[in-house]
Image (cartoon, rainbow, N blue to C red):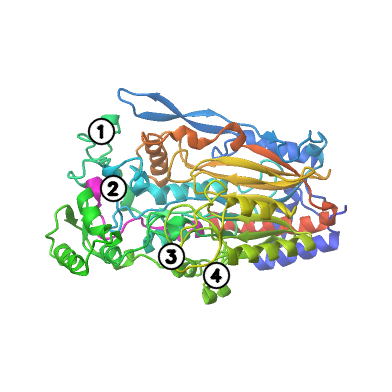
């Protein structure tokens, strides 16, 4: 199929130059150098092979080039990290059910190159609204309440954003990145600071990851009484010290002393709810006691203080009189297990609607304002959305979170019926479909309800069955379990879709991924998944830069003895893969000219991003 005519190409360059404030001459030269010009079809054959070969010397954030692995243990059990070899793509035929056509390599064309982020878990480590001491009661059960790397989450998120920026052109086809999706658990513990920091980092704004007192870290990792915590100034005398965690006396001051300057995502990004964006620790409702504590001047460092004063509101035995006595004692500093900290009204715990509303307080570039949520969502309280990522690919952002209790999720019948109708429309209109949610098919069985609630909650089996009814559904992207995992869901005659779960930014390996939808022009589609490491050195050097602190965070996370960190990397079949599926309709209906229009617009956006970054 022919691409754009000379006249169409010139008109497109003129329009894009005006839209992005670019020189028409520079844009035209850039597009020509990248293989886009009048009459050109999307890159195939030798051009794609050249792009893949170039990846061998490309950014180290790509695991095609280099992986990050645990090294040998030192005198104790603590391990540093080492660089490992890159990993090529592994074809998976679980859905296709037959050997692919070898000629697809020379014929393929990119329909969409997408960034996938999940489980960022941005943390305000100084907030009194955290319940870190609960790990002293049971490290395995309460492990997500505290991590040694908690003060470094803004740095990791910014380093991951830089990783996506470095990989803004596909190593498979040379196509420009078109969009990014964040599949939930962005704010770790409902702090307004956490929500704002995550949005600002993705938008490319400067963030000072500190709250309360400026210049002094006020939190359990700085206090000698919290022997259960990793205290980098002096880890001796506790489990972390015994395990061999290093003494890093400058770490806490480095974490909060200077703003993190994010490069920002280079493409429009979209967001959905995660359970941590919905409930406390992704599990409990928000009590009035906790809301007051979060903005106040007392922070708990013992498990008894946390359980009795912070979590007491969840116990049926907590009388109003007892809660009043607790509150007065806390204000007067009479409750044991607390230390005074600087109060901060900006630490307030956000409501469910606030999560959507804050996504409207954002930069128009990369945009979009609302990041998937619309005015309709704000007006009605509906927490799911749809959007056109390209003229041929429609995305549905779902809210799978249970509003009552528990970390796992389900799909409300209202949402289920809405999605069913929308999938019917997408099938009729011949639109490829991507589904975005926080929970995956292994964690979609939480049917907890309040007394009197009658709405049906659908679990994984019903949800997967629904998606399989519509062959236009080719991928379901999600997170929640903090590991790389790819599952095949198969229907009849080579039909089905791929479920792609990415890891997190809080737990090792601190990886995310890109997903590229490729038309093989032989009646099949491929989804290329590429695992992304954040753009930080393998070994921290102590410089205190945000990239160095992100590297330190990854090393600390790799030494989580209550988990199995290497398990979260997934198998080779869960990382860099080519996932094949039968095309649901004749993709020749997507013309080369239409794809060229799409890719030239995406390349112009990236050029504007690059010019802004260099100015």
Per the image, is 213 magenta? yes
Measured in 3D between alpha carbons, the distance from the residue under mark 1 to the one under mark 2, in whole angstroms, is 19 Å
> Upstream in the sequence, badge 1 or badge 4?
1
> Upstream in the sequence, badge 3 or badge 1?
1
Q: Residue placed at 40% from the left, 55% from the top? A: 283
> Upstream in the sequence, badge 3 or badge 2?
2
Judged by depth in the image, the label closer to the viewer, 3 or 2, is: 3
Q: Circle 4: is it few (<14), some (14-19), or many (20+) Cα within 10 Å?
A: some
First to last magenta residue range: 200-222
Q: Which residue is mark 3?
A: 450
Principal secondary structure, stretch drawn in magenta: loop
> Which SS class for mark 1?
helix
> Upstream in the sequence, badge 4 or badge 2?
2
Q: Is residue 434 above or below residue 527?
A: below
> Which SS class for mark 4?
loop
> Which SS class for mark 3?
loop
Q: Which residue is mark 4?
A: 382
Measured in 3D between alpha carbons, the distance from the residue under mark 3 to the one under mark 1, in whole angstroms, is 44 Å
Judged by depth in the image, the label closer to the viewer, 1 or 4, is: 4
- Residue 223 percent across, percent down from the top left: 20, 46
Q: Does any portion of residue 553 appear in the rendered image? A: yes
Measured in 3D between alpha carbons, the distance from the residue under mark 4 to the one under mark 3, in whole angstroms, is 19 Å
Measured in 3D between alpha carbons, the distance from the residue under mark 3 to the one under mark 2, in whole angstroms, is 26 Å
Q: Which residue is mark 2?
A: 134
Relative depth, front residue between 307 and 600: 307
Relative depth, front residue between 474 and 407: 407
Per the image, is 576 magenta? no
Left or right: 284 as drawn, with respect to 372: left
Q: Which residue is mark 1?
A: 241
């Amino acid at each position: 199929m022919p691409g754009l005519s000379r006249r169409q190409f010139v008109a497109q360059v003129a329009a894009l130059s005006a839209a992005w404030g670019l020189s028409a001459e520079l844009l035209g030269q850039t597009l020509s150098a990248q293989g886009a010009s009048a009459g050109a079809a999307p890159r195939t054959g030798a051009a794609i092979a050249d792009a893949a070969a170039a990846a061998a010397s490309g950014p180290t954030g790509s695991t095609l080039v280099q992986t990050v692995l645990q090294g040998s243990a030192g005198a104790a059990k603590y391990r540093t990290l080492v660089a490992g070899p890159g990993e090529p793509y592994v074809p998976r035929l679980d859905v296709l059910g037959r050997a692919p056509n070898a000629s697809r390599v020379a014929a393929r064309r990119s329909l969409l190159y997408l960034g996938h982020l999940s489980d960022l878990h941005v943390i305000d480590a100084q907030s009194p609204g955290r319940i870190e001491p609960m790990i002293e009661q049971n490290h395995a059960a309460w492990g997500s309440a505290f991590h040694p790397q908690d003060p470094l989450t803004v740095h990791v998120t910014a380093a991951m954003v830089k990783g996506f920026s470095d990989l803004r052109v596909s190593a498979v086809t040379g196509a420009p990145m078109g969009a990014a999706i964040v599949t939930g658990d962005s704010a770790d513990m409902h702090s307004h600071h956490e929500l704002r920091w995550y949005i600002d980092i993705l938008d490319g704004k400067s963030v000072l990851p500190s709250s309360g007192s400026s210049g002094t870290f006020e939190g359990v990792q700085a206090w000698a009484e919290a022997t259960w915590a990793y205290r980098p100034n002096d880890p001796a005398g506790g489990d972390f010290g015994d395990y061999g965690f290093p003494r890093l006396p400058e770490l806490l001051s480095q974490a909060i002393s200077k703003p993190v300057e994010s490069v920002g995502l280079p493409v429009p990004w979209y967001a959905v709810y995660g359970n941590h964006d919905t409930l406390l620790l992704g599990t409990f409702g928000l009590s009035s006691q906790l809301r007051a504590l979060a903005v106040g001047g007392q922070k708990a460092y013992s498990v008894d203080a946390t359980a009795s004063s912070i979590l007491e509101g969840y116990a049926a035995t907590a009388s109003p009189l007892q809660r009043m006595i607790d509150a007065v004692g806390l204000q007067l500093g009479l409750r044991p297990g607390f230390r005074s900290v600087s109060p901060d009204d900006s630490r307030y715990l956000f409501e469910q609607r606030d999560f959507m509303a804050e996504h409207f307080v954002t930069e128009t570039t990369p945009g979009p304002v609302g990041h998937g949520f619309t005015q309709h969502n704000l007006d009605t309280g509906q927490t799911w959305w749809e959007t056109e990522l390209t003229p041929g690919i429609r995305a549905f952002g779902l809210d799978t979170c249970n509003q009552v209790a528990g970390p796992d999720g389900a799909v409300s019948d209202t949402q289920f019926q809405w999605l069913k109708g929308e999938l019917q429309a997408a099938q009729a209109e011949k639109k490829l479909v991507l589904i975005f949610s926080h929970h995956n098919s292994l964690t979609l069985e939480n049917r907890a309800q309040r007394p009197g609630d009658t709405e049906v909650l659908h679990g994984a089996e019903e949800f997967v069955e629904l998606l399989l009814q519509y062959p236009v559904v080719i991928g379901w992207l999600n997170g929640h379990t903090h590991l790389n995992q790819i599952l095949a869901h198969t229907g009849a005659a080579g039909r089905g879709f791929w479920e792609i779960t990415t890891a997190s930014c809080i737990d090792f390996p601190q990886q995310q991924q890109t997903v590229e939808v490729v038309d093989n022009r032989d009646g099949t589609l491929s989804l290329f998944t590429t695992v992304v490491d954040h753009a930080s050195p393998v070994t921290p050097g102590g410089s205190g830069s945000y990239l160095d602190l992100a590297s330190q965070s990854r090393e600390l996370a790799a030494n989580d003895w209550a988990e199995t960190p290497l398990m979260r990397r997934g198998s080779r079949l869960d990382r860099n893969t080519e996932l094949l599926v039968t095309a649901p309709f004749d993709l020749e209906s997507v013309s080369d000219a239409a794809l060229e229009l799409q890719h030239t617009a995406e390349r112009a956006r990236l050029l504007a991003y690059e010019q802004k970054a260099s100015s």
